[in-house]
Image (spheres, grey):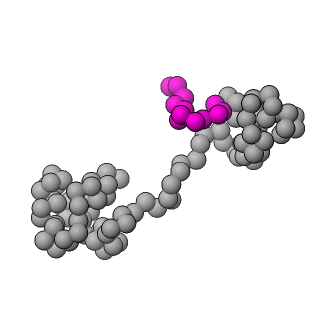
């Protein structure tokens, strides 16, 4: 399986591992790999070479309360209805519910 890099990635798994094994100074490694010294220091202090996930640790809806989220999830799992049918059934009790919010909830 190949490594997938995002568009602005400056290091690969191999580069990160080499940084972690190296005894050279951070500035020497930064010049060698053409990266910032802060990047070298970041990878030197990490135990793994994989990127950490970005974004919130506990993703949640910004338009629904926790109780509304729970109600949507329980309803969808209990009824096994398609997304649009769930949306139409729940919009009476949760008027500000949108299809995108319901989809994000049920996608996890």
Residue at point 31% right, 69% down? Answer: 64
Q: Against 3, is 64 above or below?
A: below
Where 5 falls versus 88 (above or below)?
Answer: above
In screen coordinates, is 8 left or right of 15?
left
Q: Within the magenta stretch, is there residue 97? A: no
Percent from the top left, x then y, of residue 65?
A: 33, 73
Q: Relative to the observer, which residue lies in front, 5 or 66?
A: 5
Total label count? 0
Please provide percent x and percent y for residue 102.
Answer: 26, 58
Q: Main secondary structure of the magenta part?
A: loop
What's the magenta region? 1-12
Name the residue located 60 percent from the left edge and 35 percent from the top edge: 9
Q: Write the residue at 31% across / 51% down.
A: 107
Residue 89 in picture, x, y percent from top left: 12, 64
Evaluate whether residue 44 shows in this view: no
Front residue (pair 106, 87): 87
């Amino acid at each position: 399986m190949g490594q997938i890099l995002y568009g602005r990635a400056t290091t690969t798994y191999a580069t990160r591992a080499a940084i972690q094994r190296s005894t050279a100074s951070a500035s020497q490694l930064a010049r060698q790999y053409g990266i910032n010294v802060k990047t070298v220091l970041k990878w030197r202090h990490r135990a793994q070479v994989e990127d950490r996930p970005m974004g919130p640790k506990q993703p949640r809806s910004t338009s629904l309360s926790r109780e509304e989220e729970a109600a949507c999830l329980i309803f969808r799992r209990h009824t096994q209805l398609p997304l649009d049918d769930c949306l139409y059934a729940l919009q009476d009790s949760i008027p500000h519910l949108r299809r995108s919010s319901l989809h994000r909830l049920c996608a996890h």
